Amino acid sequence: MSDDIWIIGTAMTPIRRHLDRDVLDLATEASLGALDDAGVTMRDMQVMAVGSQFEPYTFGQDVQKQIGQTGIPLYNVHNACATGATAVRSVLMEIRAGEADMGLALGVEKMTGSSPPYRMAPPKAGKVFEPEGRDGHVIATEGVLGTGQMFGVFAQTGTDYARRHDGVGFEQFAKVAEKNHAHSTLNPLAQYQRPYSLEEIMSAEMLAYPNTLPMCCPTGDGAAAVVLVSDAKLRTLDPDVRRRAVKLSAAVMTTDPYDPSGFAHPDVNTLTRNAADQAYERAGIGPEDLDLVELHDCFATAELVHYDNLRLCAPGGAGEWIDRRAPWRDGELPVNVSGGLISKGHPIGATGVANLYEVATHLRGEAGDRQIEGARVGLTHVIGLGSVCVVHILERGAS
Amino acid sequence: MDAIYDPAMTRQVPVVDYLVIDDGPPHLVGHRCDECGAVYLERRNACAACGARTFSPTPLPATGRIESFTIVHRGAPKHIGPFVSVLVRLDDGTYVKANLVGVPPAADAVEVDVSVRLVTYAAGTDDDGTEVIAFGFAYDETTAPAQG
């Protein structure tokens, strides 16, 4: 017996603009799907965590009213784009603390039908200048003092990497999107499932240089869930459940340490490097041992810098790595074979659970047309801007 | 509505409180941690680097270098249009985000790792006729190498 934690069930909804389904429909499909996949019911759950960035108040209890009110402890979780991963961690920590031996973690987001909450308001007409906020601004600063919009922030992260390293430019960033859109053609759960040529990507509408429209994740709806158990509990379950169990060999969360540039521009590199290094050490696994990676490609520029942050490529070599197609599904280390956030979609709260679904499904050998043959070890990574990072390393069960 | 425009009467306010426009040449001022020297542009209760709780105002240099940029098209405020956002490392190591001004919003017009200098401009007027003064950065002509 050990303190290992295992995934015994997982499910996700297709990511779409689900105009005919509400957020509880999506939450229910993923939750019940994960329970069914594990061959267990809500009666077996001793803890539950529900991640959604935009649903208010006691949303998790609303989900329980659809899938089973058994009186167990429940966490409602918000943590930006790492919301789903934080829900997983909440369940994992309850199990590791000995408070539970089995629990359900759900991530869900309904993003269509409302405008993105991070859109900056234009200056109000008919106004007298009055200082507001901690910076004493008198007009909206977006577009005056640079940008704080997501695609602009991550664009600057990309041009910063390009400044510091050779062989990185617009074309290398665009190649990331070319790869992920090609990968999603094999994933029936993906929001987009059509290939884009490099030329088409580079000539598409520019949102924030160097990120064009197909280099940015779409707005979509979806949910994903996992059932976690302790090592001791796993040993009591049916052989079929044990055979398909996937081990969480490392689960690491970091936030950004102080850096003098951090308040002017979020640093997504340092906390990712810290999380990756801790995860590799805890799992006793190095990047060279990985068979696939699902990383947080909210924008193409983000994916490229994370090749380096997660130690997948040689230091400073992310441009050369994509140039020689290393992260393609037939390359040396497949990255985002699901299509990634750029093409599979990015329902905020679901993302940090959906990446576990993807990797676990490959490790079980059940990924269908997009299966990475013989995959034994995988890594997932999410970043919530502000910032928070979660890295998981997963391994196929021994038996 | 029929008020006669008189520049001497025009009141000006800075776009943010860390821009100083009424004490010599326009410049930025930071909150410097009394313990470790970390500098913040916005008011802080305690220092994110060392936890100390007292700060002193410190004028910041007007020159620095561009570390990263983007050109925002989608979602740019309508009255501004596409703009160049830059992260500048000032000569004392303080970072500030602002617009790069005086260049067209085109990738081939923007250079990184070059010297820039703080500039100010009027960015609007409120119903009382008060003018807001914004800041940005422009290529530093005094230190720029000769072109061509």
Image: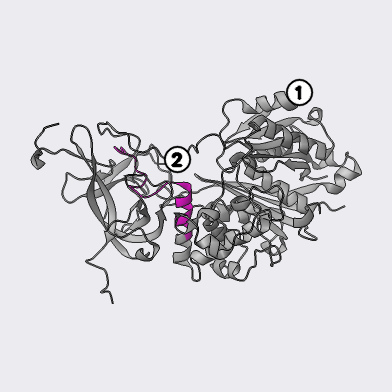
Residue A372 located left or right of residue B101: right
Q: Residue at x 57, y 53 (%)?
A: A272
**Three-letter amino acid code of the residue under disc 1:** Thr
In the image, is residue B137 part of the stretch drawn in magenta? no
Q: Quadrant of residue B79?
A: top left
Task: Please provide percent x and percent y for residue A189.
Answer: 70, 47
Whether residue A307 can be seen here: no
Towards the viewer: B11 or A184: A184
Residue A312 located left or right of residue B58: right
Please give the range of residues in magenta: A136-158
Q: Which residue is mark 2?
A: A119
SS at mark 2?
Answer: loop
Spot the residue most to the bottom: B148
Does mark 1 fall on the same chain as mark 2? yes
Task: Please provide percent x and percent y for residue A374.
Answer: 80, 60
Whether residue B82 can be seen here: yes
Pointer 2: residues within 10 angstroms few (<14), some, or many (20+)? few
Q: Residue at x 23, y 65 (%)?
A: B141
**Three-letter amino acid code of the residue under disc 2:** Arg
In the image, is residue A152 part of the stretch drawn in magenta? yes
Residue A349 located left or right of residue B23: right
Above or below residue A229? Residue A199 is: below
Q: Which residue is mark 1?
A: A70
SS at mark 1?
Answer: loop
Where is the N terminus of chain A found, in terms of image quarters? Answer: top right
Q: Residue at x 63, y 44 (%)?
A: A351
Q: Main secondary structure of the magenta part?
A: loop
Pointer 1: residues within 10 angstroms few (<14), some, or many (20+)? some
